[in-house]
Amino acid sequence: AQGDECCSRHAIYSACTYNDPMGIIGSHDSYCRSIRGRLAELMTQDCFHFMRPEVPEHEYSFDTDFVSGLDEYTDEGRPIRSRLTVTMYFEGEQREFVHRWQTQGTWDIPSNSGTTWNGHGNKLRNRYKEGPYIIEIMERFEKKPVDCQVTPDKEELNAGEVIDIELTDFRDVFGESSREFNRIIVHAYAGEIMNGEECNIGPDYKVFRVNDGAITVKYKAPYDCEEPEDRITVYSSCDILPLSRIPMNETQIYERLVEKTLDIKCYDAN
């Protein structure tokens, strides 16, 4: 899914567990409602939303766990009596760890034996505000390509000639190599992309997964010679979910990555 200026991402609350012998958080239901509300308040924005668990189009999930009655100590020697852990996962081919936030309830004074639930909530807010924020976390995890190298076998072709075009060096906004689950769409203005998966956008568009970062596109130059050149365009996509949830043909364009112009040689038969 995508918005005008970002890839829209969605998450569900997948687990809400606790072991609270100190009775800090009250009932299980109230704890789950409270932590879910706090996470939604902290993280919801135009490009990121929480959804109901039964909605399948989510990319991420969150597990929360609270435990009290601990007998641990900080590096400074302060007793730790309780701990809240929030863990974010990517729901891809396999569930994959993305990020974790954790707060500790320390025994500061006798009347505050492990901090209150509100204390944990305030600490969670502070942890999140220290950064990175949710958008950067997802960007660094997904590594969506913003650039790549386009290398054709040749840049001057005869009409109807078939060549390989190598797409390599997919890089994200931080200069890191793109993740394998990212998809790209390749379009030929006049010629034909002969491999790749069909795309609902149109017959001239083909879909590929980044996989190991090297894609060979088979291109066929046009026969009609109405244009002296052809333009190959590579687009990124917001679609990163497994094929079982978003088939290749349903892949949508996000933004243009790069264009390559090929010269088409046509000879007058007369």
Image: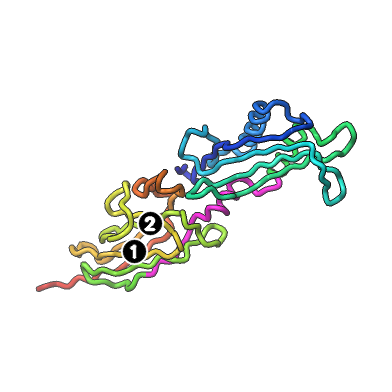
State the quadrant of the N terminus. Answer: top left
Q: Disc 1 marks which amino acid?
A: Val
- Under mark 2, the amino acid is Phe
Name the side, left or right, on which 166 lies relative to 5. left
Q: In this view, does 31 lie to the left or right of 198?
A: right
User: x and y percent of residue 251 in the render?
Assistant: 38, 48
**Image quadrant in which the C terminus is located:** bottom left
Q: What stretch is highlighted in magenta?
A: 129-151
Secondary structure of the residue carrying numbered label 2: strand
Tell me if 141 is positioned left or right of 241 in this view.
Answer: right
Q: Name the residue under label 2.
A: 208
Label 1 residue SS:
strand
- Classify 10 Å Cα crowding around label 2: few (below 14), some (14-19), many (20 and above): many
Residue at (64%, 28%) from the top-left corner? Answer: 33
Q: Quadrant of residue 223?
A: bottom left
User: Do the residues under discs 1 and 2 have CB atoms within 8 angstroms?
Assistant: yes
